[in-house]
Amino acid sequence: MNLLTQDKNNIWHPFTSLKGADDPILIESGEGVYLKTHDGKKIIDAVSSWWVNIHGHSHPAIAKAIAEQALKLEHVIFAGFTHEPAIKLSENVLTILPDNQSKIFFSDNGSTAVEVGIKMALQYWHNQGIERKKIIAIDGAYHGDTFGAMSVGERSIFTAPFQDHLFQTIFIDFPNAENEEIVYQRFQQLVVEDNVAAFIYEPLVQGAAGMRMYSSTLLDKMIGFAQEHDVICIADEVFTGFGRTGELFASYHMTYKPDIMAISKGLSGGTLPIGITSCSKKIVGAFDSSEVGKTFFHGHSFTANPLACAASNASFELLMKAECRQNILKISSLHRSFKERIEQSDKLADVRSLGTVLAVELRTDTGTSYTSPVRKKIYPYFLERGILLRPLGNIIYILPPYVIKEDELKFIYDEIEKFINNEL
Ligand SMILES: *Cc1c(COP(=O)(O)O)cnc(C)c1O
């Protein structure tokens, strides 16, 4: 039987209708920014395979690290046991996280990293016998697909079936140039008046909401004010970590540092699933006890999997090279020039860029929803031209692996510009 028929019979793909969806594309191998299909076509992975890949596909240094680790120790229970790859990774990550971060808790993916962050923040108060339970989040937020992560995220067609089972969260409006002062005032009111346990946010850019960007000055003020009132600030850097926004972490764009950080995606260079939740000494303090009830009872079978840790350490080495830093700066600057080149077009509602992220918002009369019909046109259009772009509704975005070459990026820009000029 043909592989695609077997796929159709057996497999349920993520974020995909069981009926009417196009056949998936069968990928046989990957190299650098290219994915290679079974029938020999090359596709530029302009979205870093759902935002995870930073050094290109099948990077030999990461592959080697995984292979060597697999022959030594593939996995071991992480309660009561430990291993060098995890210890080394904790050291590596702590050297690049904001210096108030003091401990590393491992899990498997972005959603679990967020769940752990929320649970840590709630138990921080519980362990001290203080009634603080409410969580503030930002309208449009996406923090993952597990129940806690869904609860602090935007309610939409995606979460509707589970609405009654999600815990209540207080949402503040998404800040923009017009409402910034009002949003800040409302935020201050909530922080002062309510029993707020935590504030969770995607620093500077909401990825899933359409690469929506907001002011670092405002966010800095919000974190500062929240911390002044002991509200635990959780930075969800699952998407923004490891250079995506130009800085190693988006939190470096602000002066106030989060109490808790969730990271994943780029951590292993996009090779193996792993998540980390880090926290400050203040958080650790509430758990620093031998009382059973104050223990953080959370863990996954594959906590700190040695293969994923080895991949992450290899990815870290690549990230620390001057070449990687230069690549990030080069992409950032090319993105800015492209933005300047096209932003006057009356076919566009907005063009924005931050670090290696570029978003082009098309002017459509169907609104900005994820299900916007223009998406159905964009996706196959670019695939036919050998470019993987996965628009969020009417928003086309590029966030490539950092190893992308200038001519490859220019090819993508030119194709986008042609699409805007000729197809809209
Ligand atoms: C992708 C993402 C998550 C969820 O990560 P998964 O690994 O897909 O579970 C959480 N928060 C943000 C900001 C994300 O972009």
Image (spheres, rainbow, N blue to C red):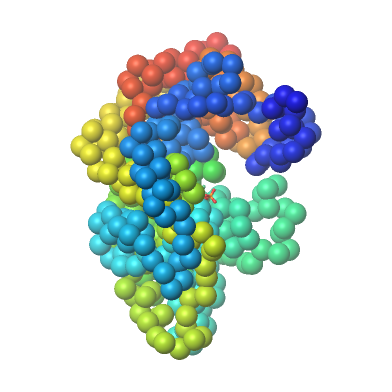
Residue plotted at (27% across, 44% down): 317
Q: Is residue 124 left or right of residue 329?
A: right
Q: Is residue 176 visible?
A: no
| Image position, residue 63 (x, y; %) | 39, 38
Q: Is residue 60 visible?
A: yes
Residue plotted at (37% across, 82% down): 288
Most extreme residue toward the top is 422
Most extreme residue toward the front is 71
Residue plotted at (41% across, 80% down): 287
Up-down: is 233 above or below 297?
above
Residue plotted at (63% across, 37% down): 370
| Image position, residue 334 (x, y; %) | 32, 25
Q: Is residue 153 left or right of residue 116?
A: right
Q: Is residue 9 left or right of residue 83?
A: right
In the picture, which quadrant includes the N terminus? top right
Most extreme residue toward the left is 322
Up-down: is 257 above or below 380?
below
| Image position, residue 383 (x, y; %) | 57, 20
Which is more toward the observer, 73 or 409?
73
In the picture, which quadrant includes the C terminus? top right
Residue 18, quarter of the rendered image: top right
Q: How many marks?
A: 0
Which is more toward the observer, 292 or 187?
292
| Image position, residue 75 (x, y; %) | 47, 57
